[in-house]
Image (cartoon, rainbow, N blue to C red):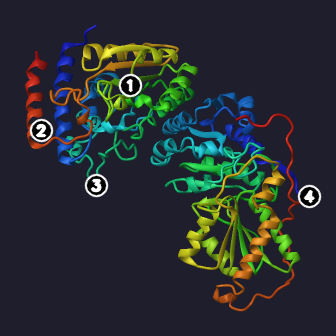
């Protein structure tokens, strides 16, 4: 079911804005990730501007919903979204990777307002959200916990340890979102060389179902598909939900889309100008 | 004879006791509750117990998440798994963000009920001591284990408690008060200082009895807190005698010996010998045979002490410039430990 068109248009404009911030912040830092942040933009926007019960003025509010970016290397996009939501000034995002900055190369809950768990070593962010969900139940709190996983990340065994235990305890205040962009740092399925192929991704919905999860597939760049999926997850009872969000790595910039070499590469001046122009060109379409 | 108590039972009973005063406490079990005695909580306070299955990496992360919401999770598993299997999870989601997660490392040291090399953890102190923000405690007996578990529960931040399996002599009376981060002088002496940690401290006391019979007066100091290490207490104890022996049921690299050497090397260098596992792994076998083969009996400690005195006949400290007089009357001991003994446990040993 389509969402409110005014909200949708606002989120689409913000998506362009976040993508531009990502590229500019990475350019300024001279380091960082690009492809993964661009694939997660709509998911993070849906969370922080529609789904999550949060208070940007009180990031430590005990009853807030939790959101953990387990694919921590993509955090520059999250910083941009948190800044737009009012957790800290937008200028601060451009201190990404700088010494003494709260905008660390990987999420640090001790430094950045709005970050609910430190992450960065893939897989390690998968389990703390289960602990939060179990704690909410134990302490009689009604908050929901979300964990945003990369699809490459689900190669880590810890993700499946978590998946098993979460369904074992019937944890329904926990939702995993898999950012299914189908490309990772070096190996990816379409590569011609068999030794470069890392392909655990087949039958991903079936895998989560087999672990006892309710599974929803959606378009991770379409708010009309994404937001209803999140709402279905919130309403699901008796078991955890996994939203498999089909995404495109490097989304929004033609020469970055689906290209693994843009996993963590800093654009040169020409590339940046071209990318920003493409993103600006997308704005009117979003306003339709 | 001192009573013999299993430290793991003391830990389990202390957890149960703490559930009455700490509503946010949660024991997370790596499916070893009938080995680690987490079952004491599982049967008597089921709301405070969750089996997390044979999935330690997830268990560590779950604990981090619970702590971030204000709970006090105690992880219960074997030391060999907690210090190794989930080390990255511990590092990234517990010690880096300084979350309030407590680890009970059961079956620590070399006496693990004949389970052998995988389960004998000779490196846990070294690994966990190297993690910033971590507190590492190795109690000597059940009394101290109980008090340490209580102290660590009420101390904010990550902590590791090194718990042993088999019954060992109780050396502390009920009047004993555990103070985190402070060494405990157990016996006065003047020829050398013996630092022990964990249950090896009990064997150090027995070694000092053997040495006394040979006219050697050993100052025995228990180091229950390996991190943060008691710099002042260690320097003071080293100054008393000018020669230092450390003994531990752990590798000679990175454990108590390493911690004491780091202190004395920088603050008060004295001749020193590090006694423990000789940079090797363990094996299956009866306790007595293991202690004998790997050189951890009181006799071995006494031999190491004598080797230190032979190699350094003159103590280093200025106050000890003269040759220490021999065959002094032994000062009265605070406690009288029993001879080393282990109690066989009936029934199945812990699985895996």
* Crowd around label 1: few <14 · some 14–19 · many ≥20 (10 Å): some
Q: Residue at x 88, y 60 (%)?
A: B338
Q: Secondary structure at mark 1?
A: loop
* Crowd around label 3: few <14 · some 14–19 · many ≥20 (10 Å): few
Residue A99: x and y in percent read 28, 55
Residue under label 2: A272
Going by the image, does A260 lie left or right of A157?
Answer: left
- Return the chain for callout 3: A
Q: Are marks 4 and 1 on the same chain?
A: no
- CA gap between label 3 and label 4 equals 61 Å
Q: Can see residue A81?
A: no
Q: Are marks 2 and 4 on the same chain?
A: no
Q: Quadrant of the N terminus of chain B?
A: bottom right
Residue under label 3: A99
The mark lying in front, picked from 3 and 1, is 1
Label disc, if present, on residue A199 of the rendered structure: 1
Q: Are marks 2 and 1 on the same chain?
A: yes
Residue under label 4: B1
Residue A157: x and y in percent read 50, 31
- N-terminal of the pair, mark 2 or mark 1, is 1
Q: Secondary structure at mark 2?
A: helix
- CA gap between label 2 and label 4 equals 79 Å
């Amino acid at each position: 079911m389509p969402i409110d068109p005014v909200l949708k248009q606002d989120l689409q404009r913000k998506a362009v804005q976040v993508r531009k911030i990502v590229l500019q912040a990475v350019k300024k830092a001279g380091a960082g990730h690009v492809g993964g942040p661009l694939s997660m933009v709509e998911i993070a926007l849906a969370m922080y501007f529609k789904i999550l019960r949060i208070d940007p003025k009180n990031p430590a509010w005990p009853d807030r919903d939790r959101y953990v970016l387990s694919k921590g290397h993509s955090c520059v996009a999250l910083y941009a979204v948190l800044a737009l939501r009012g957790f800290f000034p937008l200028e601060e995002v451009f201190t990404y990777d700088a010494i003494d900055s709260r905008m660390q190369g990987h999420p640090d809950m001790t430094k950045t307002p709005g970050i609910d768990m430190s992450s960065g070593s893939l897989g390690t962010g998968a389990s703390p959200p289960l602990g939060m969900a179990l704690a909410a139940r134990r302490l009689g709190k009604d908050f929901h916990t979300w964990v945003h996983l990369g699809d490459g990340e689900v190669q880590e065994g810890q993700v499946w340890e978590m998946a098993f235990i979460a369904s074992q305890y019937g944890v329904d205040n926990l939702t995993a979102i898999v950012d299914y962009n189908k490309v990772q740092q070096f190996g990816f399925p379409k590569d011609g060389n068999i030794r470069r192929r890392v392909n655990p991704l087949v039958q991903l919905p079936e895998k989560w179902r087999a672990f006892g999860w309710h599974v929803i597939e959606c378009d991770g760049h379409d708010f009309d598909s994404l937001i209803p999926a999140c709402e279905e997850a919130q309403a699901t009872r008796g078991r955890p939900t996994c939203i498999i969000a089909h995404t495109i790595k490097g989304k929004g910039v033609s020469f970055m889309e689906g290209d693994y070499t843009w996993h963590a590469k800093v654009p040169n001046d020409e590339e940046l100008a071209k990318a920003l122009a493409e993103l600006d060109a997308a704005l009117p379409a979003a306003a339709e | 004879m001192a009573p013999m108590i299993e430290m793991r039972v003391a830990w389990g009973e202390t957890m149960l006791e703490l559930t009455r005063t700490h509503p946010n406490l949660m024991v997370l079990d790596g499916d070893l509750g009938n080995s680690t005695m987490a079952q004491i909580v599982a049967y008597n306070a089921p709301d405070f117990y969750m089996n997390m299955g044979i999935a330690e990496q997830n268990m560590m992360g779950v604990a981090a998440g619970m702590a971030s919401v204000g709970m006090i999770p105690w992880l219960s598993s074997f030391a060999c798994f907690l210090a190794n299997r989930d080390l990255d999870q511990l590092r990234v989601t517990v010690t880096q963000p300084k979350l309030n997660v407590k680890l009970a490392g059961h079956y620590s040291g070399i006496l693990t009920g004949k389970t052998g090399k995988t389960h004998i953890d000779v490196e846990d102190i070294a690994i966990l001591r190297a993690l910033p923000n971590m507190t590492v405690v190795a109690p000597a007996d059940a009394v101290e284990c109980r008090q340490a578990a209580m102290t660590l529960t009420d101390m904010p931040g990550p902590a590791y408690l090194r718990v042993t399996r088999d019954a060992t002599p109780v050396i502390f009376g009920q009047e004993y008060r555990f103070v985190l981060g402070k060494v405990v002088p157990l016996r006065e002496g003047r020829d050398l200082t013996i630092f022990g940690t964990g249950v090896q401290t009990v064997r150090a006391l027995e070694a000092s009895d053997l040495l006394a019979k040979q006219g050697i007066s050993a100052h025995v100091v228990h180091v229950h807190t390996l991190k943060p290490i008691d710099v002042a207490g260690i320097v003071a104890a080293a100054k008393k005698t000018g020669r230092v022996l450390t003994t531990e049921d752990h590798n000679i690299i990175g454990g108590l010996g390493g911690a004491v050497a780091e202190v004395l090397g920088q603050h008060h260098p004295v001749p020193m010998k590090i006694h423990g596992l000789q940079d090797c792994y363990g094996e299956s076998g009866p306790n007595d045979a293991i202690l004998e083969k790997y050189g951890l009996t009181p006799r071995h400690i006494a031999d190491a002490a004598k080797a230190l005195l032979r190699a350094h006949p003159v103590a280093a400290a200025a106050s000890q410039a003269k040759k220490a007089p021999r065959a002094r009357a032994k000062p009265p001991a605070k406690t009288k430990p029993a001879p080393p003994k282990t109690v066989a446990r009936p029934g199945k040993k812990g699985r895996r």
